[in-house]
Image (spheres, grey):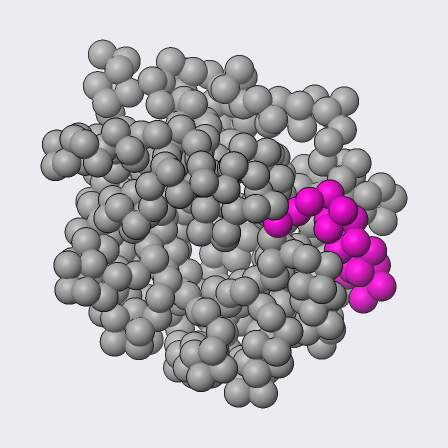
Amino acid sequence: MIGISKLYCGTVEPSDALRYGRDSAQLPSHLLQFSTDKRPVVVWNITRRCNLKCIHCYAQSENLSYENELSTEEGKRLIDDLSLFGVPVILFSGGEPLTRNDLPQLADYAVKKGMRAVISTNGTLISKHTAMTLKNIGLSYVGISIDGMKDMNDRFRGVNGAFNAALKGIENCKSAGIKVGLRFTINKSNVREIPDIFNLIEEMEIPRVCFYHLVYAGRGSNLVEQDLSRDDSRKAVDLIMDATRKLHEKGKPKEVLTVDNHADGPYLYLRLLKENPSRAEHVLELLKMNEGNNSGRGIGCVSWDGEVHADQFWRHYSFGNVLNRPFSEIWTDTSNPLMKKLKEKSKYVTGRCAACRWLSICGGNFRVRAEALTGDVWAPDPACYLSDEEISLS
């Protein structure tokens, strides 16, 4: 996760993270990526069920009941363990998490255990009553997925009316006083709608937007040809940086992030070297604190059936099940060869990744994407768009 507004527009400085000692238990949410202990943010896919039919769904969700989901009591035991382990944030996801009637109960339980609770949702099920319920629980944030304007979004989401229903969900969250933001997955079909997304967050006064690079997992495995070329990826990141800066210059700053391609960090730094060298040095320090991709270290995933994964995209490999062992034990058990290697990825990546000057900042980027295309989990990430010159191979 690369904070474009934090880094490019200077809303965060290295001293901000240092002031809290860089301990995840003490850091506010917008600084968590700069922690030293890297206690994992845990994505819990509490259900596989979803009322939409998104063509890029990593969980391959359908609108039907699944029998192998953790019960409410099993979920509470999971939350107990995560709390004792020091997990700072639990992200309730799916499927569509709001198809589970006990989501408010589980989120409330997590908040009372001292964790920040957030949800990732398509927004279509957030009524005024639901929004007030989530507000009263103390939910920290609601991320609502929109992949373009009306026609584009509804095509990607597989259900007509999904866009308008998501906008209603956003309005209901705002009225209830819950921080809400957008989540947008970039691909060839919708990349031209990025300016429209910026217009939307300005007009609706939405404080946050995350732009996700495409990951080849689940139904997203069928969209490899829809991923941007290296040149188009650079143009998209430039567009996001330019639009973020314009909002700041207009006195309407928004929190803007890119996710799932840590080449964005060095790319932003190299651009700043030309535009604002003194700011670039602060950015480099923050990128070093961030350490790049943290799958298997700073982020983890528990599936609806209790299986533990390195992140929410790595469903083909489980480290164990929380019904048999606590998450805390599974996560720290480096007798598993893959878990051990993910904790120190830089020792094992190959090719241009191994020789890259930005390895300690990028963290080897997305291993699951490399494996999806090459069959080799340690091969270079095919979505890295930095040139050989930029990474000092030539």
Q: In the image, is residue 126 above or below residue 365?
A: below
Q: Percent x, y for residue 271?
A: 18, 35
Position above or below: 60 against 233: below
Asked whether residue 73 is drawn in magenta, I would say yes
Residue 19 seen from this side = yes
Tell which residue pokes out farthest to the bottom in this image.
129
Residue depicted at 61% across the width and 42% down the height: 40
Residue at x-position 51% and y-position 65%: 141
Q: Is residue 237 magenta?
A: no
Query: In the image, residue 337 lies at what x, y percent?
Result: 70, 22
Which quarter of the rendered picture does the N terminus lie within? top left
Q: Is residue 153 left or right of residue 90?
A: left
Residue reaching furthest to the left: 275
Quarter of image, res 264: top left
Q: Is 269 or 122 nearer to us in this picture?
A: 269
**In the picture shown, does residue 210 fall above or below 227?**
below
Q: Which residues are magenta?
A: 69-88
Q: Is residue 151 visible?
A: no
Q: Is residue 368 left or right of residue 235?
A: right
Kindly identify the residue that appears in the image at 30 percent across and 50 percent down. Answer: 11
**Left or right of 92: which side holds 307?**
right
